[in-house]
Image: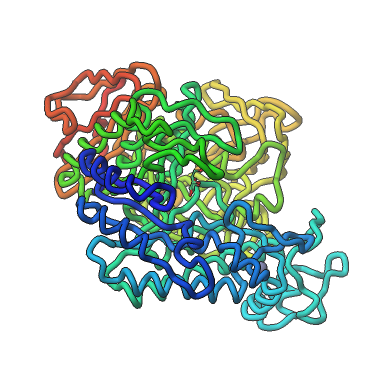
Amino acid sequence: MKMGVDYYPEHWERSMWEQDARLMQETGVSLIRVAEFAWSRLEPEEGRYEFGWLDDAIHIFYKYGIQIVIGTPSCTPPNWLVERCPDVLPRDAMRNPRYPGIRGHRCYNSPSMRLYAARIVEKLAAHYASHPAVIGWQIDNEFSLNECHCENCNNRFREWLSKKYVTLEALNQDWGTVVWSGEYSAWEQITTPLGGTTFRNPSFLLDWKRFETDSVVEFQQLQLRILRSYCPDHFVTHNIWSYPMSLDYYKLCEELDFASLDYYPGTSPEKSVSGGYNGALTLDLTRGIKRQNFWIMETISGPPGCWFPMWRTPQPGFIRAFAWQCIARGADTLVHFRWRSAPFGAEQFWHGLIDHSNVPGRRFEEYRRLCDEVNRLSLVLAGSEVIGEAAVLHSHDIYNAFEIQPQAEGMNYFDNLKLYHRALTKSGLLTDVVNTTDDLDKYRLIVAPSLYLLDEQLAEKLKNCVKNGATLIVTNRTGVKNRSNVCWIHPLPAHLAEAAGATVAEYDPVGYDVHTIRMLDGKTYSCSQWCDILEPAGAETVAWYADDFYAGTPAVTVHSYGKGKVYYLGIVAEENFYLDLFDKAAEEAGLTRVTGLPEGVQISIRRKGNSNYLFLLNLTPKQQTVQLNDTYRSLLHERSVGPDVILGPYAVEIVEFVEALGGIPLVATV
Ligand code: GAL
Ligand code: ZN
C-alpha cells in the first residue's frame, strides 16, 4: 500500500524537481505517475525521441526513494503528427474532423495513430524496462468511446460485423432490418451511424457500441503486447473515468493486472452525503471489474474547476475521509491529482495539493497526515480484501441498450442502480457490484436491476443461485430483449417468469407521475417511472397498487423457488421501500449487517486471515455517533473505542475484530 501523486516534470523548472522530490519524501509519498500527456516532449518531431529530461527527473525521484509509473502518451498525439497524418483525428457523425485543442483527439482505428503510438510505446518500454525506479505502466488516459465516423472506422466496423454475422442474411435477420426497408444487400451499404438521425435500428446501435469497445480494447492491446514483451516484471493498468460508461470496462481491463480509478467526489458540503453514496457505488463497481483490489490513479486534492466554475474547496477532513473511503472499499494505492496546481494550460484551476503560491497549506497538512496514517497501516492492511455478501448486478451492455431506447420519462438504468446500492449501503450491508456475466455462487442476496437484455444462460445461472438458497430481487424491465436487442415474444420477465412465479399482464410507463403502493400491513410507499401490473402464478403478493385503473392489482411479488426466493418489483419506489425490503431480505438470508447507521456514515470490512478491519466513515460535515456492540481496538488511533464511537465531521475510524462473521450485527441500533 503506497501513497503517490501525479507529477508533471515538464510543467516545472528543473530546479524545482529536487525540492519537490525532497518534500515528497518528507511527506511520505513513495510513488509518482508521469508522462501520460508528454508526447510532444518525448518525441518533439517524427522519430526524434528525447527521453533525457525524463531520465533526469526520474533519477532525482529515485534518489529520494520514489517509484515511478509511466503513462503512455497516446491520449495526446502531438501537432506534428496530426499535421502529417490527418487520419489520426476522429470524425463526427457529419464526418467533420475533431481538431486538437484539448486531448483525446485520436481515432483508435487510424493506422497512423496505431503505428506512431506503438512506436513511442516501444521506445519507452525498451528504455525503461530495467530502470530500478520504474514499477509499472498506465496505458493512455481515461479511455472512452469517441464515436469516430472516419473511413477507417467504417471499414473496421464492416469487418467486425462480417466476422460476427458471417452472412448478410444472418445480420438482416438478427437486426430485423425488414422494418422500413432497411435490408442490406451488400456489406458496403453498412456505415457507422452517420448523419445524426434519431430513428435508428436499436440492434445496429448496440452492435456499434460493442464495436467501439472492441476498437478501444484493440488499441490498448497493441500497447499492452509491447509492454508485456519488454517489461515482463512491470504491472500494466489503465485509469478509468468513472461511471456510467458506454465503454465496457470489464473487457477493457480483462488483460490488465489491475484496474485503476480516477475519483473526484463532489466537494459541496450539502451534497457530500449523496456524493459519498455515489462514490461508494463507483468504488464497488471498480473493485468488481476484476473482482480484486484496485488503485486510485487520481483523486481530489483541492477545488476542481476550469471549463466550469470552480467547486467548493474540500472542507477540513474531506480529502482524508474520501481517501480512506477508497481504501475501505478496496483501493491498495492512492495517487492524488496533482502535486501542485498547473500555472498554465487548460487545467490551471483544477487544484493540486499545493496551490500556485507554492506554499504548502491546510490541504497539504491534511494530506501529510493521511500519508502518515496510510504508511503506518500499510503492512497491516496489505493483502486484505473487501468482504461482499450481497451483490448488485451491472452491465455496460444493458446500460447502452437503455441509452439507445429510454423506457420512460425519468427512468435511467444507472440512477436506479444508485438507488438500490445506496439503500444497501445505508442498510449497513456488505455489497459487491459485479458484472452480470460473473459467477454469483457466493452471494445469498442478489439484486438484479432491470435485466433488460436477458438470455437463457443468464436466467439459468440466476435460477441456479436461487435453487441453492439465494434471494434474488429482480425489477421491472427484466427479460425484455435478447442480446441482439430484439424483444422476446414471451410474457415478461421471459426466462425468469417461472422462477418469479408471476408475469407482467400489462405495464404503464408512468414517468414522473407519482403512484402509490400498499403493503399487506397497510404501509404505503410512493413510486414512479414504471408500473408493471403483475399476474401471480404461484408467487405471493407483497404490495398492491393503490391508485389508477390498476388499483388493487399486484405490484410486488415474492416466490419460493428451490431453496431460495425471487422478489419481483414491478415498480421503482422511494428509497424507504428498499431500506425496508433489504432489511427483511438480509435478515432472512442471515447476512452480516450493521444496523442503525446515521445518514452519511458508511461501513465496510477488509479481511485478512482471521483479522477483520471494520471501517467507519463519516462522510458528512456534522458529528455523528455510531454504537458498536462492544469495545474494539482502533487501528488509527491506537486506543480502544466503543461501544459509542463519536465521529466528528469527516472522521474515520478503523477497528479490528476477530470474530467469525455470519449474521452477527456488529453495530447495535442507535
Ligand atoms: C482526469 C484526467 C486528468 C485531469 C483530471 C482533472 O479526468 O485524467 O488528466 O484532467 O481529470 O480534470
Ligand atoms: Zn476513426
**Residue 631, image x and y in percent?**
14, 24
Q: Nearer the viewer, residue 404 or 104?
A: 104
382 relative to 354, above or below: below
Query: Which residue does the image show at 47% across and 72% down from the upper left?
Result: 48
Residue lying at the far right in this picture: please name it: 181
**Residue 140, image x and y in percent?**
47, 61
Query: Which residue does the image show at 41% across and 46% down from the upper left?
Result: 298
Q: Nearer the viewer, residue 77 or 277?
A: 77
Please tell me in which quadrant of the rendered image residue 289 appears.
bottom left
Is there any visible trace of residue 583 in the rendered image?
A: no
Query: Which residue does the image show at 15% across and 49% down from the upper left?
Result: 609
**Residue 180, image x and y in percent?**
87, 65
Please tell me in which quadrant of the rendered image residue 584 appears.
top left
**Residue 445, image x and y in percent?**
40, 45
Left or right of residue 332: residue 184: right
Is there any visible trace of residue 413 in the rendered image?
A: yes
Left or right of residue 340: residue 333: left
Q: Nearer the viewer, residue 364 or 420?
A: 364
Query: Which residue does the image show at 15% across and 43% down from the upper left?
Result: 611
403 relative to 107, above or below: above
